[in-house]
Image (cartoon, rainbow, N blue to C red):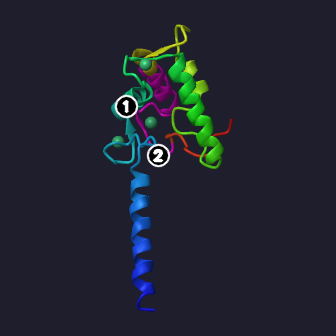
């Protein structure tokens, strides 16, 4: 008994730490200042950060090769966690849709323009911020 308790406590605090890390993880927490709403600036910052993460060789363009790698990663993740759904920004299909001039590559300008359009679409009451109700649902998007 006296040996079990500390172990249980250790497991619990580990779980708490893991949970916290998860909540603040890189998986698209766009509400940078934690005020519960996502401003246009926060949305854009998150889009830029995501773009830079996806631009593996940092040349300012996500090319077909990088797109394919992203797609592969997303599929692997979905196969591993089918219940997790897709992160904000959608899948590789949504990425390809950002390619405004259809040259098979996505520039940072295209990604940011797409993100702006997405923000406008999400901001149902057009007050310039995404309230919790307007924020994209992270699990089980219906398509
Ligand atoms: Ca915010
Ligand atoms: Ca690149
Ligand atoms: Ca709004």
Front disc: 1 or 2: 1
Task: Name the residue: 59% across, 47% down.
Answer: 84
Residue stretch rendered in magenta on the structure: 112-133
Dot 1 crowding, Cα within 10 Å, few <14, some 14–19, many 20+: some
Give the x, y percent position of residue 64: 54, 16
Tally the marks: 2
Please indicate whether residue 72 sits to the left or right of residue 118 in the image. Answer: right
Dot 2 crowding, Cα within 10 Å, few <14, some 14–19, many 20+: few
For ligand 3, which image quadrant applies? top left
Q: Which mark is residue 88?
A: none
* Magenta stretch contains residue 120: yes
Say which label, 1 or 2, has the lower sequence index: 1
Mark 1 CB within 8 Å of ligand 1:
no
Mark 2 CB within 8 Å of ligand 3:
no
Q: Look at the numbered disc 1 and give the secondary structure of its residue.
A: helix
- Given residues 15 and 102, the one toward you in this image is 15
Q: Look at the numbered disc 2 and give the secondary structure of its residue.
A: loop
In the displayed structure, 121 sits above or below 31; it is above
Q: Are marks 1 and 2 in contact (CB under 8 Å)?
A: no
Looking at the image, the residue that sits furthest to the right is 143
Displayed quadrant of residue 141: top right
Q: Which residue is mark 1?
A: 49
What is the quadrant of the C terminus in the image? top right
Task: Name the residue: 59% across, 42% down.
Answer: 77
Give the x, y percent position of residue 124: 51, 33
Task: Name the residue: 39% across, 54% down.
Answer: 21
Give the x, y percent position of residue 59: 37, 17
Q: Which residue is mark 2?
A: 132
In the displayed structure, 125 sits above or below 19; it is above
């Amino acid at each position: 008994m006296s040996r079990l308790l500390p172990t249980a406590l250790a497991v619990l605090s580990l779980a708490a730490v893991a949970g916290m890390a998860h909540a603040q993880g890189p998986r698209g927490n766009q509400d940078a200042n934690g005020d519960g709403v996502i401003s246009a600036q926060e949305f854009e910052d998150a889009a830029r950060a995501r773009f830079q993460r996806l631009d593996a060789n940092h040349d300012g363009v996500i090319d077909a090769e990088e797109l394919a790698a992203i797609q592969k990663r997303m599929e692997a993740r979905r196969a591993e966690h089918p219940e997790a759904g897709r992160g904000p920004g959608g899948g590789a299909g949504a990425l390809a849709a950002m390619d405004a001039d259809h040259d098979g590559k996505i520039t940072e300008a295209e990604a940011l323009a797409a993100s702006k359009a997405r923000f406008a679409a999400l901001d149902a009451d057009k007050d310039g911020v995404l309230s919790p109700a307007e924020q994209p649902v992270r699990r089980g998007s219906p398509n």
